Amino acid sequence: MPQPPEPLGLQAWATAPGSVLHLDSSTYCFVDRFLYHMRLSDETLLDIMARFQVEMEKGLGKDTNPTASVKMLPTFVRAIPDGSENGEFLSLDLGGSKFRVLKVQVSEEGKRNVQMESQFYPMPNEIIRGNGSELFDYVADCLADFMKTKDLQHKKLPLGFTFSFPCRQTKLEEGVLLSWTKKFKARGVQDTDVVSRLTRAMKKHKDLDVDILALVNDTVGTMMTCAYDDPYCEVGVIIGTGTNACYMEDMSNIDLVEGDEGRMCINTEWGAFGDDGALEDIRTEFDRELDLGSLNPGRQLFEKMISGLYLGELVRLILLKMAKAGLLFGGVKSSALHTKGKIETQHVAAMEKYKEGLGNTREILVDLGLEPSEADCIAVQHVCTIVSFRSANLCAAALAAILTRLRENKKLARLRTTVGMDGTLYKIHPQYPKRLHKVVRRLVPNCDVRFLLSESGSTKGAAMVTAVASRVQAQRKQIDEVLALFQLTREQLVGVQHKMRTELEYGLKKKTQALATVKMLPTYVCGMPDGTEKGKFLALDLGGTNFRVLLVKIRSGRRSVRMYNKIFAIPLEIMQGTGEELFDHIVQCIADFLDYMGLKGARLPLGFTFSFPCRQMSIDKGTLIGWTKGFKATDCEGEDVVDMLREAIKRRNEFDLDIVAVVNDTVGTMMTCGYEDPNCEIGLIAGTGSNMCYMEELRNIELVDGDEGKMCINTEWGGFGDNGCIDDIRTQYDKEVDEGSLNPGKQRYEKMTSGMYLGEIVRQILIDLTKQGLLFRGQISERLRTRGIFETKFLSQIESDRLALLQVRRILQQLGLDSTCEDSIVVKEVCGAVSRRAAQLCGAGLAAIVEKRREDQGLEHLKITVGVDGTLYKLHPHFSRVLQETVRELAPQSDVAFMLSEDGSGKGAALITAVAKRSQPSRKEN
């Protein structure tokens, strides 16, 4: 082991200006050599730091935790104070020689403000080493006395219980004691829930009305107290009678707790580091002797090298051995020096005081019945320095490991953080803080660390945890109330299914069709591809902000389709200009494509995918009922779009095309999948818009002549609910989105289920939650006020299981939303609730059609395939799964397969054109 830099010791004192003492170097060197193994180099400290990082990993792992010495206990404290906490709270602090009860008043008043009243009660030895029931009865008695003294008996107050011993928690208000530490040995408490024990004891006092909301370790209390003053505080360290540390860990790294979202405070219980032998090479004979004489031999070995309960005893054992070796006090040993516990840590601190230290040392040694020389006093002081310096070094190494983990979790090159500090050793020892800070900064140069001393830390901290728990509980309740609006019961989904079925029937009947919200438009597509289709076809696809022109080559028999396409933008001024401008733009795009493909003079059959509600009288005629999806071109509604396209081709007078079919994109999707799977009789689009088509028995379609065979019906189900039939499940947010849309009162089902609107629903919810102070610190950014800013693609990204919360925060930052970790979790929950409801509503509508097909065919069991297209279905991480689960639940007698359409609308239009050409060989041109 390399020689470390010397701590302040004999030589420093001997050569200090004005010193009257002169030591020969052989005495100094011999004393220093005697304690050589207690002096740790930076190289050794970095090694200890690495070992501690390994132990942390073990403690966090489900499989390795049972054998880990550093237990890394989840505390279920998931948030630090944000300044909005307020109210009155009680706090108990059990863990040392005194027991403390506090009343803490927390108020906002524009600035963080805490007022405290407290009372200390003694903890007699017969209580802490007696029967467990007597211990908790005593604590309850003290609490009752405090409440009576402070005239609080008439109040119902939440309570935080600081219990400074290792506990395994499964929730914030529960903790099973793993083992007593320090001097506590009360029988029958280990392996029991200490909150239940205290609750039972409190029930014996009829005038006590207290809810224990949180069980808190003193270290956690320290962190929370400091976090109230400094939001950067995410580590708590206690160096007092015992020693421990806690910090905020990413949930995704904690195997012991369900869930990956957010962070949770981990109580490391680092005092047990080394209990598995990991520190044997740095433990000395004095550490081993002290351990053997302790209440818990073989346990808390790291703590026994560091904390206030043991440093004085370590110094005593060293001095005794040096005296026996004739190195001190002329070899004389007093009976006090032989007595365990006679040198306390407060003595060590006093002996190391600047200027007064030597005088204090002489006084303390004389009190021990010794007659020290000046050289003895300096030697003893040097022993104290090395023992306490080692303590600070060991703490620094473990703390440096935690800081490194925090920095790596956050993927930062440099970490800015605050460490909340408490404990008598840290507070009363004159050199300790300075030494600790210096070594930490040396070990982690890439961390900017502020050390903040906790004021009445653990007890005030327990009140802060309780205050945060109360705030989070209240906020959670408000958030859950909003999310509950989007959670549909099975009964509600069945209701949607039945109402959809009713609307389907209305749309098919002559008498009711005019008033039906689900228009059930006949498409005049009466056949499915049979594999004999062949030839070259032109296809157009208009349905969103992009327009596609395709050349589709179909070979018969082999079911082989090759496609060439070009995408053209439809500018907003064209989408919302005149109809003539829109169709002239479309023809310009066709001309560009024909030029590009070298087909200018070719007369090709054309299929026109037009993804808006049309009433058709034949396969090549389609009258636009109404625009959707942001289109508003004038002079189009009520007009035949095929005629409008023909007129625009004539105006250009460059080419002629055989327009065989006008097709909805949903029908195109069904036909594309039907080309591969003859069972495909339903087409679903779940994308920017939402729609469904299916093959209906001709006998059920009153608007079309004939009873034989089937025809594809374009349901245009986006208008479902426009008559108010689903108002019971529409929320205030749906109404706000509807009122702010281009077509208020129309397409209500689509506005709850399609990609064009889901992001906007989320935005409305986020605004409402922010107004309530539940998100973004109550600050609504200008970006959040902007309609359409929260696109549905962000829902897909945010809900991705592969995305860490840090990435969710980055997405929100792109939107100008400065979110905390907790904000990100809530945003993700909101996105999940909105998209899940959309998928369930789509599933309920689809189940209505599946059941109709089964009953129409008189089958007990139906096997059917649904061809699906649309960005929401394809790109959202959970939409397709939830939709399929809903269909299975609501249509249990049908075996429904889902087939993803490849390039559905364009290829489908060509296939419909091919089928139409095949079935109408003698078709004349219009």
Image: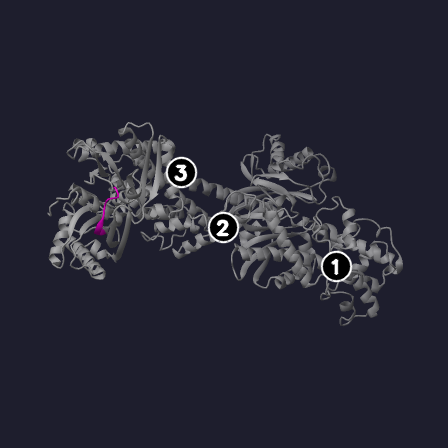
Residue 621 at x, y percent in the picture: 15, 44
- Label 1's element? helix
Q: Earlier in the sequence, mark 2 or mark 3?
A: 2
Mark 2 or mark 3, whichever is nearer to me: 3
Say whether residue 730 is visible.
Answer: no
Q: Earlier in the sequence, mark 1 or mark 3?
A: 1
Give the residue pinned by disc 2: 82
Residue 350 at x, y percent in the picture: 74, 58
| The quarter of the displayed image where residue 37 is located | bottom right
Q: Which residues are magenta?
A: 530-540
Say whether residue 677 is visible.
Answer: yes
Q: How is the image coloured?
A: one colour
Give the residue pinned by disc 1: 38
Q: What residue is drawn where x is 58% and y is 57%?
A: 403
Q: Is residue 717 left or right of residue 891?
A: left
Dot 2 alpha-carbon crowd within 10 angstroms: few under 14, some 14 to 19, many 20 or more: some
Mark 1 or mark 2, whichever is nearer to me: 1
Q: Amino acid at mark 1?
A: Met
- Give the farthest residue toward the bottom: 17
Magenta run includes residue 538: yes
Q: What residue is drawn where x is 67% and y is 60%?
A: 45
| The quarter of the displayed image where residue 192 is located | top right
Q: Nearer the viewer, residue 80 or 715?
A: 715
Q: Amino acid at mark 2?
A: Asp
Q: CA distance from mark 1 to mark 3?
A: 61 Å
Q: Amino acid at mark 3?
A: Ala
Q: CA distance from mark 2 to mark 3?
A: 26 Å
Q: Nearer the viewer, residue 458 or 839?
A: 839
Q: CA distance from mark 1 to mark 2?
A: 43 Å
Give the residue pinned by disc 3: 484
Magenta run includes residue 681: no
